[in-house]
Amino acid sequence: MTENVSNVSKEHAMNIMNVDYSTKIPNNVNLSEDRQVLKALEGWHPGYMNWWGDMGPEGFQQSLVYLRTAYSVDPRGWAKFDYVKMPDYRWGILLAPQEENRVIPFGEHFGEPAWQEVPGEHRAMLRRLIVIQGDTEPASVEQQRHLGKTAPSLYDLRNLFQVNVEEGRHLWAMVYLLQKYFGRDGREEADDLLRRRSGDADSPRMLGAFNEATPDWLSFFMFTYFTDRDGKMQLHSLAQSGFDPLSRTCRFMLTEEAHHMFVGETGISRVVQRTCEAMKAAGISDPSDVARVRALGVVDLPTIQKKLNLHYTLSLDLFGSEVSTNAANAFNAGIKGRFHETQIKDDHRLQNSTYPVLKLVNGEIKRVDEPALTALNMRLRDDYTQDCIKGLLRWNKIISTAGYDFKLTLPNVAFHRQIGEFKDIHATPDGVLIDDATWNKRKGEWLPSTDDGDFIASLMIPVTGVGEFASWISPPKVGIDNKPGDFEYVKIET
Ligand code: BYC
């Protein structure tokens, strides 16, 4: 008897772990028995494919790309690699396994059983957060659609497309939640996610950074390092949600997201590495000798710093205002928690605690204690900054190992902001407040100028030979799926 029960539950666990590919939309949520949602998703599918055709990677749609596809949600092994034409990629609905007896880990409902259905009183807030999350996913694909044409290698081209198809899958993940749990208005929101366009004057994407251009591959690496990392932090917060389907969805998305940030971190490492090697070979001792370094066909370190300044600050804006009642309400409601909420040792309600927030006080940047509940965006942003620093340490190690006295740094949070406490002032990357005239005169020292953009654009010449790399970037240390250096990651068919 006991044996039977355990066999049944083992089989159930297997079904949740493994993805059902027999339906048009692969899934581990038993869609074949959820006809209504399956029908809604199948109805949305053609619009998605049209969007992918119009706004997905430009060209290469008939090329065979060596992509990973999820066949399971088992953290010990979930991906299968094979050549796929992107339009044939199996975008699916994958939720991490349900945790038995999970409780809401924070807020007013702390300790109550997690919700399997949408709690009526928090419906609007939950829908808004899911829509914002969903909106960023196709936006990034739109921003990156032209990059295939200038890829520095087949390895990088493949990584771009891997990121793109998985962001597409993340859109499916949010659309599933909208269609399954939010009825008619959920279906309307799902349609709107295919209607908005990154950078469109009439119908832009919802958050600032997702309407900016990603003009070149250095921007792509910065974006996947800094902006995808905001994605990581936000997904971690939503993975704590009392609404269990959202939590499970985000937990699986996070496993995919790790590769995107890897692409960013190693991409920047490889650019820095190549620059240092070229400077050394040419006997250049001053990395700030921009003209001489550029003449070598590599990106000078000061320009890398400017790109970093831009993408880090655009990403800081994605955390919202430092002091936010929206954030407090979402926490109280048990909808959006903190980074690693369950590992934090406190009361998880925060009614009486404070958190130090950087604010503008009488024209000076000061740390002020604010109620911890309203300071949750600031706290998440601080956790984010700590996470960002890890990459900088690695990049700086490459520079110092090459013998150069130059350090990449994160600019002060008051620098170049469009959201929050510092949006109406100007500050230098060191956090010194300056007036408009000084800002206008000096901003080209800190942010990429048109000249910088033109120089980087001049390097963006596609390299499509097997095992070959552009002049400005080093080959990776290891291949994807342990493939050798001369592996043909994309079989280009035009
Ligand atoms: N741009 O109280 P406030 C990712 C709005 S990235 C435009 O300060 P709140 C990915 C805000 O909507 C992660 N508007 O902020 C990465 C509000 O408007 P309403 C995406 C902004 O609400 C790479 C008003 O200002 N996921 O996954 O506490 C590739 C006052 O808001 C912005 C999420 O963001 C902005 N930057 O926090 C692919 C998670 N900031 O409602 C994917 C879900 C604020 O008054 N979102 N506003 O009209 C949230 O948790 C929060 O909505 C935010 C803002 C963190 C975005």
Image (cartoon, grey):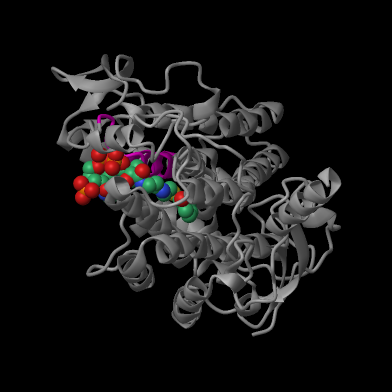
Task: Looking at the picture, tell me which residue is in the foreground, 207 or 95.
Answer: 95
Q: Is residue 319 magenta?
A: yes
Q: Main secondary structure of the magenta part?
A: helix
Q: Quadrant of the C terminus?
A: bottom right
Task: Looking at the picture, tell me which residue is in the foreground, 36 or 328.
Answer: 36
Horizontal placement of 454 versus 328: left or right? right
In this rendering, the answer to whether 475 lies above or below 355 is below
Hey, which quadrant is residue 330 in on the image?
top left
Hey, which quadrant is residue 63 in on the image?
bottom right
Read off the magenta span: 309-323
- What residue is shown at x 45% (from left), y 40% (from top)? 241
Hey, which quadrant is residue 322 in on the image?
top left
Horizontal placement of 153 versus 55: left or right? right
> Residue 70 in the image: x percent, y percent?
69, 61
Q: Is residue 265 magenta?
A: no
> Residue 326 in the image: x percent, y percent?
26, 38
